[in-house]
Image (tube, helix red, strand yellow):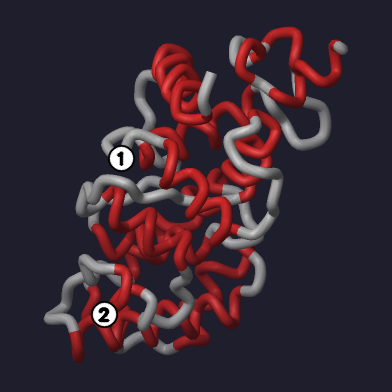
């Protein structure tokens, strides 16, 4: 079985396990997803979803965030950790989107990476979830860890290398949802501390499991 064939089989099984391959962050507006992802750095999505309703109620528009006092934003996001840097990035990115991008979240990698606090993982998430660009790979910790165990990558921990390797083998129209489903699988079954291999239906295609049973 080639890597592409293995990837396709895993994609189909994940679709059965997690029919709704969606982001676990709550957001009604594209820029709210952008900032929620920033807040999720070194923090759980669950915590971010608890924090953002009050933040976006206090600052309901991009304009209000751009004019916000950074110290007040800090108060709302304090529990997400690294709150000073995150607050600074949120306000600065709001200002940049208004000044340079017509008040919209950019729709391409180059411009997204210009925004404060935005790296390739965040940019790919925006391109996939907001703009539905095919072929994007969100190489977060779950994706990196599980794709390595499955043998879809060479086991590298480098997000850029994981992204490149997965792009080559995943069906472009499935890649974004595949990454979301890996997050769900990483929380429910293939956890970092103790993967539940016996109850994992991805076992037939998993290098980690196959090596452990030999």
119 lies left or right of 200:
left
With 174 as the anchor, is 168 left or right in this view? right
Report the residue at 27% width, 36% height from top. 173
How busy is the neighbourhood of tag 1: few (under 14 within 10 Å), some, or many (20 plus)?
some
Helix, strand, or loop for circle 2? helix
Q: Quadrant of residue 83?
A: bottom right
Q: Contact, CB < 8 Å: mark 2 with mark 1?
A: no
Measured as percent of width and height from the top left, residue 135 is found at 32, 47
Q: Position of residue 88 (x, y in %)?
A: 49, 85
Which secondary structure, mark 1? loop
Mark on residue 35? none
Kindly identify the residue that appears in the image at 30 percent across and 40 percent down: 172
Of the 4 image quadrants, the one containing the C terminus is top right
For the residues labelled 2 and 1, the Cα–Cα distance comes to 37 Å
Q: Residues within 10 Å of mark 2 (few under 14, many from 20)?
A: some
Question: To which quarter of the image does residue 124 belong?
Answer: bottom left
Q: Residue furthest front?
A: 2
**Would you place residue 83 above or below residue 190 in this image?**
below
Labels 2, 1: front one: 1
Image coordinates of residue 56 in percent, x first then y, are 34, 63
Residue at (63%, 56%) from the top-left corner?
Answer: 43
* Quadrant housing the N terminus: top right
Residue bearing mark 1: 172
Q: Residue at x 17, y 72 (%)?
A: 104
Taking the view exactly as shown, the residue that stands out farthest to the left is: 102
Identify the mark nearer the N-term, 2 or 1: 2
**Residue, disc 2:** 64
Q: Nearer the viewer, residue 88 or 8?
A: 8
- The relative height of residue 77 versus residue 73 in the rendered view (above or below) is above
Q: How many marks?
A: 2
Residue 127's place in the image compared with 86, above or below, is above
């Amino acid at each position: 079985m080639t890597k592409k064939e293995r990837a396709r089989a895993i994609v189909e099984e994940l679709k059965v396990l997690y029919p709704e391959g969606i982001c676990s962050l709550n957001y009604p507006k594209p820029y709210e997803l952008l900032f929620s992802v920033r807040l999720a750095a070194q923090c759980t999505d669950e915590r971010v979803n608890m924090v953002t309703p009050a933040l976006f109620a206090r600052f309901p528009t991009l304009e209000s965030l751009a004019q916000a006092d950074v110290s007040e934003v800090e108060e709302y996001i304090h529990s997400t950790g690294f709150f000073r840097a995150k607050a600074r990035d949120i306000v600065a990115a709001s200002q940049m989107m208004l000044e340079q991008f017509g008040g919209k979240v950019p729709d391409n990698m180059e411009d997204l990476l210009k925004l404060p606090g935005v790296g390739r993982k965040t940019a790919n998430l925006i391109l996939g979830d907001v703009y539905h660009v095919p072929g994007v790979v969100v190489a977060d910790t779950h994706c990196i860890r599980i794709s390595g165990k499955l043998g879809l990558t060479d086991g590298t921990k480098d997000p850029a290398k994981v992204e490149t390797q997965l792009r080559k083998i995943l069906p472009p129209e499935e890649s974004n949802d595949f990454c979301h489903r890996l997050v769900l699988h990483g929380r429910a079954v293939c956890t970092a501390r103790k993967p539940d291999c016996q109850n994992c239906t991805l076992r037939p295609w998993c290098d980690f499991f196959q090596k452990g049973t030999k």
